[in-house]
Amino acid sequence: MTAQVATLELSHSLAVELHALFRALDLRIQTPELVRDKLEAAGRALDELLEAEWNLVPDAVAQSVERVAELLREWTPDDVETWADLKAQLREAYAGFASALQAEQVAVPELRPTNYTRSAFHMMAAGVCLMLVTTLTPEQLPWVAGGFAVWGWSLETLRRISATANRWMMVLFRPIAHEQERHRVNSATWYVTALVLLTLTYSPLLSVVGVAVLGFADPIAGLVGRRWGRIRLANNRSLEGSLTFVVVGTAAALVAMQLVQPTLGPGLTWAVAVTAAVAGAFAELLSRRVDDNFSIPLVAAGSVAALLALVGTSPWP
């Protein structure tokens, strides 16, 4: 094992301990004792990294480590009044650290704090999309979705060209943005990109199923998983969250299908809804390098298309 690989593994260990610190800070009942324990664990991981040949890692990782070290040394766990400000700064530093490690093909846990505003926006956007599917023709939908996608990717391009524009956009969208989106394509852009591909199927049924599963199951499962999730699965997802995804996704798909009035019959309608929800849950569970706002609707719709083909039924009116 080369020194650089070993150092990247130590960087991964630091990321895991920092993530555990954030989880402690996000608990409803916070105690200085718990925060102190997690902070000390992160400090030990940091010291182990700094004692290694960490200067061999890429510059982006090294700079992020220096910023994390600076903030951890400032932290006084007994001074509760300093938590909010330091936590916000450390989240920003962690996002840069995680992005730098991911560029080196090192998987790190993502920060997914509970954000009710983001979840509400997620579901509201799904409601708007469902309304558009029911009011526009299949031929019109790709143009509308394409317009949103052009707008989204134009903003992404601007963010890459201008650090100032990126900073201001993160301020503007702070109520609904995750900190790690400062360094990568944001989920909303992947969302509208998936919508373009859904509308290009020219199937209202596939479109509403994909939108409903993503728009309602994903945010509610996230809230349940972060609040009550105890049994961990792949990519830091929880069994409780995944089961919630299947239940909510099935209900959302059943309701959404009524908007386009498919002539599938009760049994097949239920089969379609459950298939879409289960497939979406697996996509959410296994998505790591691909944003789940892109993978979930496409996998859900694709699974439905496969099911209908298997039983000899068409997803087109």
Image (spheres, rainbow, N blue to C red):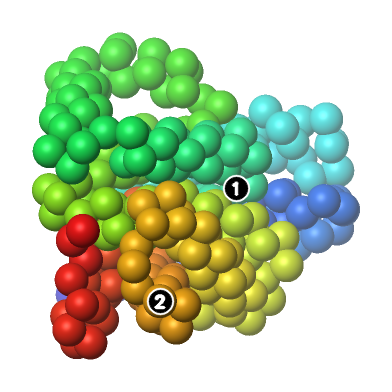
The answer to whether the residues at label 1 and label 2 have Cβ atoms under 8 Å apart is no
Residue 64 falls in image quadrant: top left
Report the quarter where the C terminus lies: bottom left
Question: Could you tell whether 263 is left or right of 93 in the image?
Answer: left
Return the residue at label 1: 113
| Mark-to-mark CA distance, 1 and 2 | 41 Å
Residue 89 falls in image quadrant: top right
Rendered location of residue 218, percent (x, y): 49, 57
> On residue 265, which mark appears?
2
Q: Is residue 248 visible?
A: yes
Q: Secondary structure at mark 2?
A: loop
Rendered location of residue 130, percent (x, y): 40, 42
> What residue lies at 30% left-to-right and 12% top-to-bottom?
164
Q: Report crowding for label 2: few under 14, some 14 to 19, many 20 or more residues within 10 A (C-alpha).
A: few
* Number of disc labels: 2
> What residue lies at 38% left-to-right and 47% top-to-bottom?
97
Q: Report crowding for label 1: few under 14, some 14 to 19, many 20 or more residues within 10 A (C-alpha).
A: some
Using the image as rendered, state which of residue 48 and residue 32 is in the foreground: 32
Q: Secondary structure at mark 1?
A: loop
Report the quarter where the N terminus lies: bottom left
For badge 2, the amino acid type reads: Gly
Using the image as rendered, state which of residue 126 and residue 206 is in the foreground: 206
Rendered location of residue 176, percent (x, y): 51, 32
Q: Is residue 7 visible?
A: no
> What residue lies at 18% left-to-right and 71% top-to-bottom?
314
> Which is nearer the N-term, disc 1 or disc 2?
1
